[in-house]
Image (cartoon, rainbow, N blue to C red):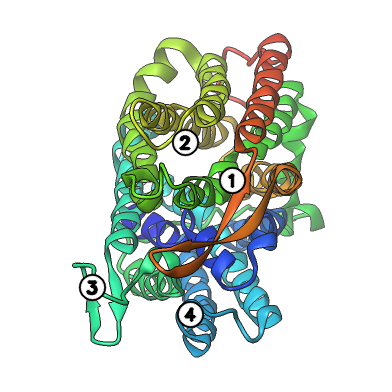
Amino acid sequence: MNFLEFAVWGAYLTCMGNYLGIAGLGDKISWFYAIQGIVSIFMPTLMGIVADKYMQPQRVLGLCHLLAGVFMMGCWWLGYQAGFGQQLADKSLFIALYSLSVAFFMPTIALANTTAFCILKENGMDTVKDFPPIRVLGTVGFIATMWFVNCAFIDDSGFGFTLAENSHKFQYTYMQFFVSGLLSFVLFAYCFSLPQCKLEKKEGKVSLIESLGLNAFKLFKRRQMALFFIFSALLGMCLQVTNGFAGPFLTSFKGVPEFADTFAANNATLLTSISQISEAFCILLIPFFLKRFGIKIVMLMSLFAWVFRFGLFGMGNPSMPGVLLFVLSCIVYGVAFDFFNVSGGIYVDQECEPSVKASAQGLFMMMTNGLGATIGTLAAGEVVNSFCSWQDFMVNGEKQSFLVGDWATCWYVFAAFALVVGVAFALVFHPESSTAKK
């Protein structure tokens, strides 16, 4: 389940920006990633309510993937009609279909967590110890599709992996959406083979707030949980920045003659997949770090890792030894992402009662990938658009568009923000020692 869950996302998340530039939507990159955040403000919570009260979470997970796949295939079809290297004829419809697809995909991240935690507990397993090795397969799935779209190409003669003349890599084309949609259909079918998850039935009279699943918001009454969710939103502002702009940033070096033929400039998706490889290893470290240091130190590690993630991008370049800074940035990403997202999901599961677990996971998702990611991505887009712009270059006799400008300043601005949030978190967040909360 986890492998397919994140394989769906990995097919387009880190390389979509390159296609949007070609399709005439380059100035809207930040909005495409912000849309994921906007729908995460309400959709994970709504689907969490359904999974808590009305339908088993693994079934809600499957149905969401069915709808996400249908709309993602619509994006592929519009790109196919336009043709390779051509601008989309109906950009508004493309944006609408993409928005509907991610509206149903984003809740599945929390639903997958809820399903996994439920099945593990039903089998008498420890979520802190046993969930991370399962979750790591999600990262493996993400990497697998990243590598696939980086290496696969299509041309007039068909599909292949050995780059041919006049061929088009999936990472620069609409074919990345086809891969994502197809995998959503596979996961839809697979979800109905998963073990059953019991619905928590509340005896006696149920209030309107409880029936709507809004009682998960009572977690805000506890000061430390309120602070946790606030900082979740602030850290969430970092989540989609490199997903949205690392690809265009690395690919932009193709417009610089001295870097045009470097591996990093021509294989941005493959290079950034080192981030997910690091993520896979770091997930396995979470049980040790959580039990040894606790949630505060683990989250602090994540926050300061974001400082290095952005700062190293600002200092690097595609040639030796500058490319090593890119590699280090990707390695640091494992700590930056996992030590917050995965640990945070475990922390929320421990801090709330069974009847609101799915809703609480949806609330966590809303704060991070919803409010935080939306504000952060739009703000990052404004920063990038202030210092960079799309320009046309001739590469091997073919006109190509790259997002070029003062990228270093952009990355340093993002690093400074992460540093301020990290220091503030260290000063004000003091988690309660016991995790057995009412």
Residue type (three-letter) at the residue carrying disc 1: Gln
Could you tell whether 330 is left or right of 281 in the image? right
Can residue 356 be seen here? The reply is: no
- Please identify the residue farthest to the bottom as the structure is shown: 81
Distance in Å between CA atoms under marks 3 and 2:
41 Å
Residue at image location 58% in from the left, 41% down from the top: 239
- Nearest to viewer (mark 1 / mark 3): 3
Q: Which mark is residue 325?
A: none
Give the residue at mark 3: 164
Residue type (three-letter) at the residue carrying disc 2: Val
Q: Secondary structure at mark 3?
A: loop
Q: Which mark is residue 342?
A: 2
Label 2 with label 4: CB-CB less than 8 Å? no
Distance in Å between CA atoms under marks 1 and 2:
16 Å
Give the residue at mark 4: 76
Distance in Å between CA atoms under marks 1 and 3:
33 Å
Front-most of residues 112 and 145: 145
Can residue 413 be seen here? The reply is: yes
- Nearest to viewer (mark 1 / mark 2): 1
- Nearest to viewer (mark 3 / mark 2): 3
Q: Is residue 91 above or below residue 10?
A: below
